[in-house]
Every structure is written in structure tokens, then in C-alpha cells.
Amino acid sequence: MSTKLIIFVLAAFSQRVQLSHDIEYTNSFNIFGASSGAGSWSDDDFTSSSVGTGNAGPDESFLRRGAQVFATREPVLSKSECESLIREAQKAIAAGSGAKLEVDLSRKDWERTNSDIGEARLSGLPPDTLNRLRSILNDRLYPMLESRYGVPDLTAYDGLILGSIAPSQSQPVHRDASLLTLNIPLSDSHDYTGGGTYIEGISELDTPLVIERGHVLCHASGVMHAGNAIKTGERWVLVIFCIARDEPQIARRCHAGGLAAFDDDNLEGAFEYFEAGLSVAPGDHLLHMGAGRVQHAWGKSSASFKSLKAAADLYLLDQRAQIALGDALMAQKRPRAALRRFDKALSAIGDRDLLDGAWMPLKALTWNARVSAATCALLCAEAEAEKSKKDMGWSRSRLPEAVGRLSTALRPCPDNGYIQSMRERAVELLRSAE
């Protein structure tokens, strides 16, 4: 797309975004009120961790300390307030008014919650409950967020009370369709095992962050995160999505618009959205990945590779772009080049997926990468064996690692015949090379 066309598309889209944002903010303000000051919160009231500068999404620069994730040291909601919200959610779900929140254009990932009992939309709760929530927001939560992130005129776009019963499913890693996200467990931690929030970049050993009932976890909505499944028991959690009057979040909405257009098979429209977003946030890895998906669908392998490489280089916390590059190179029948990409991803992950309590999506991602890397090594070794029966130095150096990766892949599925046959062939080739 030409620069002039990008400018035209961005200008037109910006007008629509601003109008949509203004309507959204006004409607939200009428229900949930807005922040009026930072209150008396101090740094001593929180623990904090950083996902790293540049890793908190396209709106990070609008926020003070946007890369920081905060958790309160003391509960912000009392036990009785938490129990009351659970009861109201249960009533709403039983009455059939617990419909899912329609979050503008951020459909798929966001809508896949780990809720099994049901979920109650905050704006659909009874007026007296809404009044209590509004007081909690105005008196405690808005001032808390303003003290952490320096953003005035916040309001809740909406939110959900989610109920899960074990065994539940974890969400995929995603961003929220808002500026700031609040997560407040309503259940006592003794009522369940598992749960918590996985936050890319700070979750030690890739395990979720778990906080106690009534405590608050808050972060930029652009931080990549996911709700973690519970293993036993029942868990309720309050999630609130906040927006700010003066930040329409153009780049985030461009990405959401691009995904919606892509799902509707409107590739040209999707690419326009992604390109417009990149003109505002050139360092956003998800916009680059979106552009790469469109280019791949168009058959533009070189352009797609360039976009995916940009995504991989910009966001080092997630190896999905690196693995996608490997998959693309495999499709081009370039196994050695693909193997280098898988090697890079697996080196970054190390053995974190094998640790007790490791996040399940990380386990799945790494399992696939190990198998793909071993497949590449086998293809290269087969080619070397055909060309030269005498000198198989590459195979001697690389096949032991492939055998090890396949052995690791067999741990969760020891009866997998396909992986077993791959390992047997790798061992056979290694013996021939020696």
C-alpha cells in the first residue's frame, strides 16, 4: 500500500475510531462513573514486576510505568463484598442474563474464557449492585489505577464475573480490548487449586501469578496474558476493563479490525487495517504478524517472511513468530533454514515447559517445536545420506539432538507411533553416519 493510501486509510479510520471511542466512553461513564483523582495509594501498597519496556502493547507509551504489573499487598474488596458479587453473578447466570461481553472487534481470543459455570456481564447486573460497584470503582479502583499508571479520566468499559468449576480450560495468550485490566479473585484460595493469571514476561518459570481473595492484579491490557485453568474446586473472579477519555487506542483497534476482516476473507481490508496500525505503532509485533498472515495467504512468501521476522525480532518473550518462520521455511522445502528457526525458539524456551506446574500452552507450543525441529533434522540427514555415504558430518553432529528431542516429545505420549518411528529412523541414520 502506498504511503498516501495509508495516510488516507488511517485518517478515515481514526475518525471512526474517535467517534466510536467517544460513544463508548460516554456510555461507560453513565454506568460506571469515572476517576477523579489518585487518592492515597502509594508504592508500599503494591508488589510489582515488569514485562520489559516495549512489551506491554501499542498503548504502553500512553501509560506511566506501562510495562509494570501491580498486585495489592492487602485486599481491596472485603470477604462480604466478594461473596455478594458471587451471589449476584449466580442469580444473573441462572436468570439467563449472563451473556458474554461483546468486545468490539477483538473477537476470538478474548471470547475464549476459562469459564465453565458461566459469566455475568457487569453492566447487566441489578441497579443496586451496579451502584455498589460504581462506588467501589470511584472510591478505590479508579484512584488505584491512576496512582499506578498516571492516566486521568478512567472509566470501566465493562467487565465480567466468571465462574469456573474444575477441570477448566486455560485461555490462549491474548490482549484485552481496553487500556487497563483489573483482575480480582472473589473465591477463597482454599476453594480451588490452579487458577491465576499467566503473564508473559514476568511469570516465574512460566507459571501463573496467583493472588488471594479481594486482592487486585492490574496491568496494561496490551500485556500478553491468559487466565489459567483450575485443577480442583470452584473459582469466581471479577475482571474489569478500563478505558481513558483521551486515548482512543487506534493501533489496538486497527489490529482488531484486521483480524475481523481476515476472518471474513477480506484480505485487502485486513491488510489495510494492519498497515494503518503499523503507521501508528511500528513496533507492535501482533500487527506485523497480522500483515504476515495476509501476505502468506496472498502467496507473497518473501514479504510474509519479512513481516514474521520483524514480529520475532520485536517481541522476544513469545516464540510463536519464530516458530511460524520455521513452519514457513518447511513449507518452502528449506529444512536447514527452518531448523535454525526452531533451534532459536527452543534455545529461548529451554526446559521451562518440562518443569512442574509449567503453563500448558507453553508445553504444547514447545512439543510441536521439538517435533518440527527433529523432522527438519531427519530431512537434512536423509538428504546427506543420499549424496554421500562416506562423509555424514552434519548428521553426526545434529542427529543426537534430534533423538533427544524426540525422546522428550514421547514423555507425555509414549505410545505415539509416529514419534516412535521418527526416533527409530533418527537412531538408524546416526548409526550409519558413525
Image (spheres, rainbow, N blue to C red):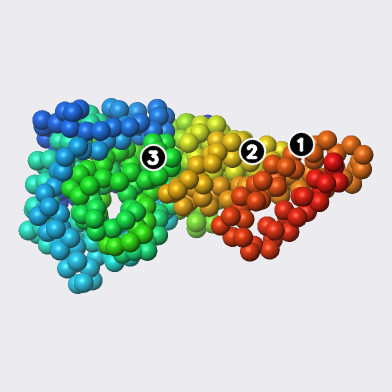
Circle 1 packing at 10 Å, graded few (<14), some (14-19), many (20+), is few
Mark before the other along the chain sequence, 2 or 1: 2
| Quarter occupied by residue 265 | bottom right
Residue at 73% x, 55% y is 422
The answer to whether residue 339 is left or right of residue 56 is right
Q: Amino acid at mark 3?
A: Ser
Closer mark to the observer between disc 1 and disc 3: 1
Q: In terms of depth relative to the viewer, which is nearer, 407 or 224?
A: 407
Q: According to the image, label 2 marks what residue?
A: 343
Closer mark to the observer between disc 2 and disc 1: 1
| Quarter occupied by residue 249 | top left
Mark before the other along the chain sequence, 1 or 3: 3
Q: According to the image, label 1 marks what residue?
A: 397
Mark before the other along the chain sequence, 3 or 2: 3
Circle 2 packing at 10 Å, graded few (<14), some (14-19), many (20+), is some
Q: Amino acid at mark 2?
A: Asp
Element at label 3: loop
Q: Amino acid at mark 1?
A: Ser
Residue at 19% x, 66% y is 90
Find residue 247 and report its horizontal and vertical position in percent: 29, 35
Find residue 393 and report its horizontal and vertical position in percent: 83, 35
State the quadrant of the C terminus: top right
Element at label 1: helix
Q: Are marks 2 and 1 in contact (CB under 8 Å)?
A: no
Q: According to the image, label 3 marks what residue?
A: 203
Element at label 2: helix
The answer to whether residue 207 is left or right of residue 307 is left
Residue at 35% x, 34% y is 59
| 3D distance between C-alphas at marks 3 and 2 | 23 Å
Q: In terms of depth relative to the viewer, which is nearer, 271 or 433?
A: 433
| Quarter occupied by residue 12 | top left
Q: Are marks 1 and 3 in contact (CB under 8 Å)?
A: no
